[in-house]
Image: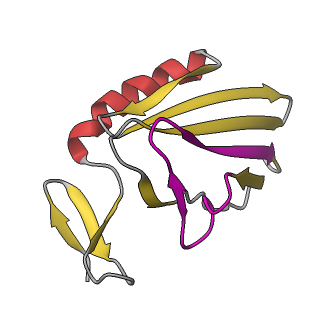
Amino acid sequence: SIEKENGVVHKPNPSSGGPLPVGIPKEVIPAMRKAFSNLCTSPSGVLFENALLQVGVKHEYVGAQGRISIFFGNLGKGPLKNFKAQIDDCDHLRVQKQGTDGLLDEEGCTVAVKTQAKLLVLVEVMAP
């Protein structure tokens, strides 16, 4: 079952039975909206940052094609284990994804302290 605690959605972790955070805490959304607005007019920037994680984005577009690089930096004092990214497919975009080994897999990857997991997303608009 899905639980909610301090604005963060949790679902059961199949391997440990404990809660697994999913989603974005409500109190972070206003800052992310501002960061997203800044990224709409700048080719790179920080989308999110807290004591554990920094998410940076670089993007460029030519015609109907885009190249988006997403960097997940571990700012914490320990490794981020079972770290994974999920990008859902949609009908109007052709999407190719490649990233740090394990990042796109069900089990995730480990991001060591002061290192990054990287995700490259190539997109092409298929319909207006």
Res. 36 visible in picture: no
Q: Which residue is painted at 34% across and 78% down in the image?
A: 13
Res. 29 visible in picture: yes
Magenta part of the protein: which range? 100-124
The quarter of the picture where residue 35 lies is top left
- Residue 7: image x %, image y %? 18, 54
* Relative to 49, residue 119 above or below: below
Front in this rendered view, residue 91 or 10? 10
Q: Which residue is painted at 23% across and 57% down in the image?
A: 8
Judge whether residue 116 is colored magenta. Answer: yes
Q: Which residue is painted at 48% across and 25% down in the image?
A: 46
| Left or right of residue 42, residue 34 in this image | left
- Residue 79: image x %, image y %? 42, 51
| Left or right of residue 120, residue 11 in this image | left
User: Which quarter of the rendering shows the C terminus?
Assistant: top right
Front in this rendered view, residue 72 or 80? 80
- Residue 5: image x %, image y %? 14, 61
The quarter of the picture where residue 105 lies is bottom right
